[in-house]
Amino acid sequence: MSFDDWMLALHVIAAFAYVAGIVLFWVLIVAVRKTDTPEGTIRMEPIVKVGNVAVGLGAAGTIALGILLAFRLDSYAIWDGWIIAALVLWAVAGGIGQRTGAEYVKGMTKAKELEASGHTGPSTELLAINRTSAGVLLHTLGSITVLLILLDMIFKPGA
Amino acid sequence: MNTLGLLAVVRPDRWNFPLFLHVLGAMILVGGLLTGVGLLAFSRGDVRFLRLGYWTLLAVSLPGWILMRAGGEWIASREGWTKSGVPSPTWLDIGFLLADVGGLVLLVSLIVGGVGVYRLREGKGAGLLRATLVLAFLLLAAYVVAVWAMAGKPS
């Protein structure tokens, strides 16, 4: 395998990590909708960290190695329409992802506040925060954006 | 022009959709495995997490595997690798081997996990779900190797 083959393989593995993180957060979004206790919410924190690492490494790996490949491969140029589209979509997905994270951090913060104040039982307020419709909408938009990147990478419109 | 660039340029458009389905299925599969492994590993005996981990493997990874495998067969057929007498490249052999053996291991892990979830209802231990965790973790590692082989296409 050449250096470029390795870079492509790592680029694709990074893309898998990115999508795996998104899938993980979908499962947690479904799970947290039935979670009304501080303990149940806080217990999700280690899994959230796994998702954050997957998305972080995936996002960084795809962009860094993608740009490297665009410069190294003769058949592609960084100003190709489909590559520019991918860069824009990547930035959009990142922005949406940050907002999604902020929505769901509210539930975690509230759970920690409740626990610190000695409230361990079910809380309707916590449940309402965990069931954030804005968070679901943002994660849907983020997922669609990443799906568009995948379509763009495979179909390479205009290439 | 290097081989990698040439291959990307000459891939016919009619290969794209099956390739998309194959890759999307594989991504869902890996996502389900990562989530299932994460939930089972961090459950610390919490029944809710153990169940969620198992159901993630069943409801996310299994459909992902089916889509990946069907898409893989379709794209391999479109590329002409499934015709009799046509020698298949190493990367494709690795991919098919890991997909098929992995599918079998996934099935075993789901059966074992299913019994484990049933035993949880009976108030028994989570030993079988720990076995599911180990199998799912091994599968995750194997599929990362498969992704490397399919993307990097060694020899």
Image (tube, coloured by chain):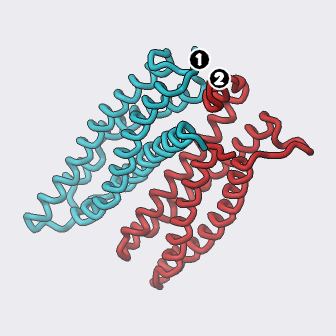
Chain colours: A cyan, B red
**Amino acid beneath label 1:** Ala
Cβ–Cβ under 8 Å for marks 1 and 2: yes
**Quadrant of the rendering where the N terminus of chain A is positioned:** top right
Label 1 crowding class (10 Å Cα cut-off): few <14, some 14-19, many 20+?
Answer: few
Element type at marker 1?
A: loop
Q: Label 1, label 2: how many angstroms apart (C-alpha)?
A: 8 Å
Identify the residue under disc 2: B9
The numbered dot on residue A159 is 1
**Amino acid beneath label 2:** Val
| Residue lying at 26% horizontally and 46% vertically, measured from the top left | A104
Element type at marker 2?
A: helix
User: Eyeballing the image, is A8 above or below B28?
Assistant: above
**Quadrant of the rendering where the C terminus of chain A is positioned:** top right
| Residue lying at 44% horizontally and 31% vertically, measured from the top left | A68
**Discs 1, 2: same chain:** no
| Spot occupied by residue A93 in the image (x, y as percentages of width and height) | 37, 32
Quick one: B154 or B71, which is closer to the camera?
Answer: B154
Hey, which quadrant is residue A63 in on the image? top left
| Spot occupied by residue B138 in the image (x, y as percentages of width and height) | 55, 66
| Residue lying at 32% horizontally and 54% vertically, measured from the top left | A48
User: Eyeballing the image, is B118 above or below B53?
Assistant: below
| Residue lying at 30% horizontally and 39% vertically, measured from the top left | A100
